[in-house]
Image: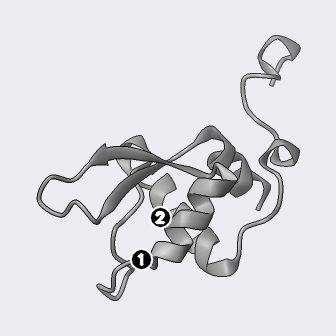
Amino acid sequence: MDAANANLRPSAEDAGPKPSDVQLAWLKRGAEQPGGKLPLFNEYGQRISPRTVRVCLEKGWAEPWFWNAIKPDWLVCKLTRKGRAVLDGD
């Protein structure tokens, strides 16, 4: 990366503390989706823990994407630049 573009991508240091294994797995799945959409369910079909979602939102690794009118208690989120920096540092 040349010097002119060096600050366009956040560094792992900017991301702050490291996520837990569960949080990291959830964030990684979002990195594979268009727009960084984070899944509502894990690979076994179980809903992602609201605690996992809440902590990732608080740390700035994820952000709300849109409100789900069919299931208003489900928070649809996407990966942030800070979340991608955490993954890049992994």
Look at the image and tell me in which quarter the C terminus lies.
bottom right
Q: Position of residue 2 (x, y in %)?
A: 83, 18
Point 45% across, 74% down: residue: 50
Residue, disc 2: 29
Query: Which residue type does callout 2 highlight?
Result: Arg
Q: Position of residue 88 (x, y in %)?
A: 72, 51
In the rendered view, tell whether residue 8 sits above or below residue 20.
above
Please state which of residues 87 and 15 is positioned toward the viewer in this rendering. Answer: 15
The answer to which quarter of the image holds residue 17 is: bottom right
Q: Which mark is residue 56?
A: none
Say what secondary structure mark 2 lies in. helix
Local packing at callout 1 (Cα closer than 10 Å; few below 14, some 14-19, many 20+) is: some
Point 22% across, 60% down: residue: 72
Point 34% across, 88% down: residue: 44
The answer to which quarter of the image holds residue 19 is: bottom right
Local packing at callout 2 (Cα closer than 10 Å; few below 14, some 14-19, many 20+) is: some
Q: Is residue 5 left or right of residue 21?
A: right
The answer to which quarter of the image holds residue 65 is: top left
Query: Farthest front residue?
Result: 73
Say what secondary structure mark 1 lies in. loop
Q: Position of residue 73 (x, y in %)?
A: 28, 65
Q: Position of residue 20 (x, y in %)?
A: 70, 76
Please state which of residues 90 and 63 is positioned toward the viewer in this rendering. Answer: 63
Residue, disc 1: 48
Point 18% across, 64% down: residue: 71
